[in-house]
Image (cartoon, helix red, strand yellow):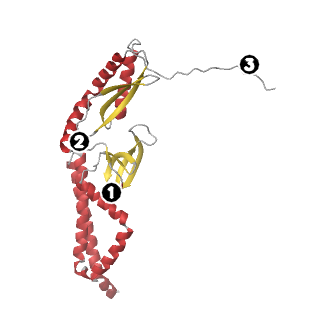
Amino acid sequence: MEDIINKYLFDPTIGRLVAAALGIIAVIIVVRILQRVLSKYVQDSSTRYRARKAVAFLGYILAFLVIATVYSDRMGGFTVAFGVAGAGIAFALQEVIVSIAGWVTLAFSRFYKTGDRIQLGGIKGDVLDIGILRTTLMEIGDWVNGDLYNGKVVRLSNSFVFKEPVYNYSGDFPFLWDEIVIPVKYGSDINVARQLISIAAHDILGEYAAKARVGWDRLVNKYSIENAQVEPLVTTQADENWINFTLRYVVEYRQRRSTKDKLFTRILSDISNSDEVVQVACTSMDVTLYDKSNLPTKQ
């Protein structure tokens, strides 16, 4: 029994395994302590998230260095075996490797970051987390109308950054252009209708227009893009049924639905208070009922 204990106790292989395990445990403890310290003393959520991710990444590197140090004297003999195995692993795990490459690209680019609203792989939502292999989104839309959460948490492979377009709704210009259409009856005072819509847009959207102008000017200075109108714009189009007044405006990307509600509420209220100078148009249908007893019968 004593010989068996001495054999395993002083076995170099077991000694290396124990040393590697203790080193990895020490790295895990240090990483956990640093992450708790960061959570306690870093107040900004975005900075805290990035710092915790950086500490975790450094932990992976330290764990690898520990293993490499413990087995450094045997690395030379494994070179050929690692090369052959690496080629097979690279072929079998090509999706994983592309996902890791996507994570590296996200870390050193400005495709998107946590908190951004994006569309990736056909899914639209807010970025909750960017992992080594996957990006986690809180999905919006689907069966829910408007840009509202539907409750689904979606995890997408980072490889999508190389395969499909990445739409960022809150990147360099965190505003969107949106439109509402108000149908007005023929016979209404067109000038009054335009004035009512313009005043409502100015009162509700004036704050957005000022902020959007600053953001758009910054975008023009950064990219080769022409200037654009960010102030509310009212246009008119007539058809055979009524006159359509289209209000085009810029809104903060998270406030699109609530802003549209405010605009419709204000404009419809102002129209109803215009003493029928302006009237909202609608489709009317005449329904005629027939008495079946008067219908001719087949002979």
Q: Is residue 86 above or below residue 185?
A: below
Toward which corner of the image does residue 280 lie, by quadrant?
A: top left
- What residue did someone put label 3 on? 294
Farthest residue, direction bottom: 3
* Mark in the foreground, 3 or 1: 3
Q: Amino acid at mark 3?
A: Asn
Label 3 close to label 1 by CB (< 8 Å) = no
- Residue shown at 33%/19% (left/top)? 196
Residue 150 rendering spot, x and y as whole percentages: 42, 42
Mark with earlier residue (2, 1) = 1
Of 23 and 263, the residue lying toward us: 263
Q: Residue at x 33, y 30 (%)?
A: 248
**For the N terminus, which image quadrant?**
bottom left
Q: Are marks 3 and 2 in contact (CB under 8 Å)?
A: no
Q: Residue furthest left?
A: 221
Q: CA distance from mark 2 to mark 1?
A: 25 Å
The residue pinned by badge 1 equals 162
Q: Looking at the rendered structure, which numbered label has been put on residue 284?
A: none
